[in-house]
Image (spheres, grey):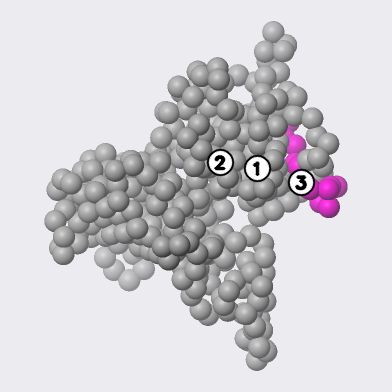
C-alpha cells in the first residue's frame, strides 16, 4: 500500500514544484491530493502525466492522510498545522512559523536526517516537522561535511537570492520591470520589492530588526545553529538579485582545525547532495542558470583565505524552489519511510 499525500498551497510556485518532484522521484503515493484556498478550488494542476483539481483546504478531512506538505505561508501553518497533526497526519511545513519551536525538528536530511529516528519513536511527538529557509538549506548541505572534518568556528554568509523566493509576485515584478525598461517605459518601484529589482540589487529581504539585521539574515543565523551546531558563529547579509530562480551564496569560513582547499574539495565531492564544479578557468564554476531543475547543491570557487588561520572561501548555488523548499520536504518524507514509517491505511487494513 502507498502513502496518501496532501499538498497544501498546491497552486503556488513551491506547491507546483512539490507535485513535480513527487512525480519525478516516483514517491510511493497511493493518492496525491492538491489543496488550496477557496478562491483556487477547482484549479487544475499537473502531477506527472495526471491533472489534479485543487480541493478546498477548509472542508478537507485529513483522516487517513500520511503526509501534509504545507507551502501556504505562516498564517495557514499556524492555524492548520496543529489541527492536521492532531488527526495523526505528519505535517512537513515550508513556512517559518514552526522552525524555532524547540519541540519541532528542523530538518535537512543530508545534515540531520538521523535525528528523525528518535522523533519517530516518540509517542508524544507534535507530528510537525519544519523545513528550513531556502538559503539555509543549501548552506548547511555544503557546510556539514566540512564541519565534521575541521569544525567551523565562524561563517560569514552573503546571499544573492532570486526573485522566486518572493513567490509568483516577485517573478512577475522582475519580468514586468524588465519588459518596461526594454520598451523605454518607466519600470517603477513595483509593490513586491522596496526598490526597482530589474537591473538592480536590493540588500533587504524581509523586515528589519532592532539590531539592523533583516529577518531573512536572522533566519540564516538561527537555523544554521539549530540544524548544524549552536556553537558556530554566523553572520549574514541577504541580497535580492534580478535572477528568476536559484540562490547563490559567497561564504567565508573559519575552522578550529586545519583544512586545505584540496581537502575541502575532496570532502565535498563525497558529500551527499553536493556537486563540486570548481575549475580555475573562465566558466569553471556554477551559476543559477545551470542549477535550475537540479536536485544538488553546487559548490565552486573553493580556495584558502590567508587572512585568517584555517580559513576557506566557497561559492554555493542551488535551485531554491527545489532543494530550498519542495525537494527538501519530500526528502524528509522519504527519510521517515526509510526509518520505518508505515502507511496509515496499512495499519487500518491489518
**Who's the residue at 65% across and 50% down the image?**
73
Q: Is residue 171 magenta?
A: no
Between circles 3 and 1, the one closer to the viewer is 1
Query: Is residue 40 within the magenta segment?
Result: yes
Above or below, 237 relative to 41: below
Q: Which mark is residue 36?
A: 3
Q: Residue furthest right?
A: 42
Q: Quadrant of residue 194?
A: bottom right
Q: Is residue 228 visible?
A: yes
Q: Going by the picture, which residue comes out furthest to the bottom?
A: 184
Q: Say which label, 3 or 1, has the lower sequence index.
A: 3
Task: Give the structural element (helix, strand or loop) at label 1.
Answer: helix
Instruction: Work out whether residue 153 or residue 251 is closer to the camera in this orientation and state it.
Output: 153
Q: Are marks 1 and 2 in contact (CB under 8 Å)?
A: yes
Q: Residue furthest top?
A: 350
Distance from disc 3 to disc 1, alpha carbons, whole Å, reads: 13 Å
Of pointers 1 and 2, the one earlier in the residue sequence? 1
Q: CA distance from mark 2 to mark 3?
A: 20 Å
Disc 1 crowd rating (10 Å Cα; few below 14, some 14-19, many 20+) is many
Amino acid at each position: 500500500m502507498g502513502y496518501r499525500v496532501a499538498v497544501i498551497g498546491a497552486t503556488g510556485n513551491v506547491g507546483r514544484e512539490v507535485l513535480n518532484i513527487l512525480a519525478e522521484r516516483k514517491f510511493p503515493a497511493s493518492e496525491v491530493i492538491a489543496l488550496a484556498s477557496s478562491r483556487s478550488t477547482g484549479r487544475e494542476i499537473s502531477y506527472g502525466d495526471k491533472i489534479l483539481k485543487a480541493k478546498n483546504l477548509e472542508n478537507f478531512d485529513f483522516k487517513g492522510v500520511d503526509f501534509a506538505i504545507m507551502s501556504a505561508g505562516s498564517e495557514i501553518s499556524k492555524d492548520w498545522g496543529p489541527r492536521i497533526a492532531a488527526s495523526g497526519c505528519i505535517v512537513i511545513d515550508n513556512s517559518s512559523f514552526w522552525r524555532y519551536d524547540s519541540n519541532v525538528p528542523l530538518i535537512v536530511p543530508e545534515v540531520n536526517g538521523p535525528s528523525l529516528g528518535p522523533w519517530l519513536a516518540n509517542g508524544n511527538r507534535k507530528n510537525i516537522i519544519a523545513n528550513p529557509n531556502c538559503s539555509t538549506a543549501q548552506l548547511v548541505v555544503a557546510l556539514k561535511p566540512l564541519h565534521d572534518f575541521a569544525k567551523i568556528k565562524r561563517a560569514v554568509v552573503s546571499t544573492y537570492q532570486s526573485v522566486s523566493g518572493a513567490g509568483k509576485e516577485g517573478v512577475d515584478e522582475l519580468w514586468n520591470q524588465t519588459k518596461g525598461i526594454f520598451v523605454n517605459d518607466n519600470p517603477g518601484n513595483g509593490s513586491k520589492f522596496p526598490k526597482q529589482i530589474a537591473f538592480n540589487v536590493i540588500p533587504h529581504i524581509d523586515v528589519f530588526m532592532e539590531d539592523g539585521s533583516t529577518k531573512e539574515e536572522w533566519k540564516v543565523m538561527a537555523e544554521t545553529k539549530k540544524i548544524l551546531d549552536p556553537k558556530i558563529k554566523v553572520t549574514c547579509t541577504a541580497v535580492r538579485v534580478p535572477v528568476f530562480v536559484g540562490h547563490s551564496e559567497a561564504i567565508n569560513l573559519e575552522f578550529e582545525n586545519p583544512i586545505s582547499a584540496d581537502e575541502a574539495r575532496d570532502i565535498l565531492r563525497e558529500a551527499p547532495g553536493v556537486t563540486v564544479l570548481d575549475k580555475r578557468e573562465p566558466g569553471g564554476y556554477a551559476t543559477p542558470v545551470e542549477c535550475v531543475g537540479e536536485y544538488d547543491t553546487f559548490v565552486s570557487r573553493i580556495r584558502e583565505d590567508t587572512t585568517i588561520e584555517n580559513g576557506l572561501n566557497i561559492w554555493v548555488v542551488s535551485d531554491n524552489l527545489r532543494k530550498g523548499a519542495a525537494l527538501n520536504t519530500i526528502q524528509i518524507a522519504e527519510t521517515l519511510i526509510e526509518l520505518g514509517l508505515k502507511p496509515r491505511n496499512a495499519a487500518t487494513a491489518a
